[in-house]
Image: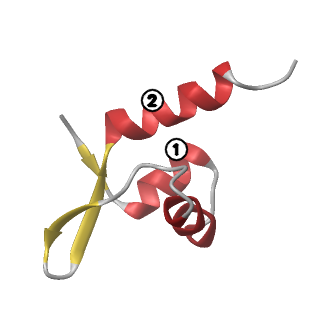
């Protein structure tokens, strides 16, 4: 299992910070994991699963 920070999540998905947090609030993006009092990260495999789901559900 690998944790990734916000900048990496932004790079992986092409989403902005505000879009990521908006999707989290809507329940449409994986929640972050608290690593400490001022540090959060995401589980890389959950981000990859989310991206694969976007691909699977796209209209061609």
In the displayed structure, 57 sits above or below 38; it is above
Instruction: For mark 2, give the secondary structure.
Output: helix
Say which residue appears at 22% left-offset and 40% top-offset: 2
Report x, y in % for residue 5: 33, 59
Say which residue appears at 41% left-offset and 49% top-offset: 30
Taking the image as shown, residue 56 lies to the left or right of residue 29, namely right
| Residue placed under numbered mark 1 in the picture | 12
Residue found farthest to the left? 36
Using a 10 Å C-alpha cutoff, classify the residue at mark 2 as few (fewer than 14 neighbours), some (14 to 19) or many (20 or more): few
Marks 1 and 2: in contact by CB < 8 Å?
no
In the displayed structure, 58 sits above or below 40; it is above
Residue found farthest to the bottom? 38
Tell me which corner region of the image, top left, top right, bottom left or bottom right, holds residue 16. Answer: bottom right
Q: Nearer the viewer, mark 2 or mark 1?
A: 2
Report x, y in % for residue 48: 45, 32
Tell me which corner region of the image, top left, top right, bottom left or bottom right, holds residue 46. Answer: top left
Determine which of the numbered discs, if any, sits on residue 49 in the image. Answer: 2
Residue found farthest to the front? 27
Residue found farthest to the right? 60
């Amino acid at each position: 299992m690998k944790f990734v920070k916000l900048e990496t999540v932004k790079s992986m998905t092409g989403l902005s910070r505000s879009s990521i947090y908006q999707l989290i609030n809507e329940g449409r993006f994986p929640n972050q994991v608290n690593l400490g009092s001022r540090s959060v990260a995401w589980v890389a495999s959950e981000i990859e699963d989310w991206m694969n789901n976007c691909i699977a559900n796209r209209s061609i």
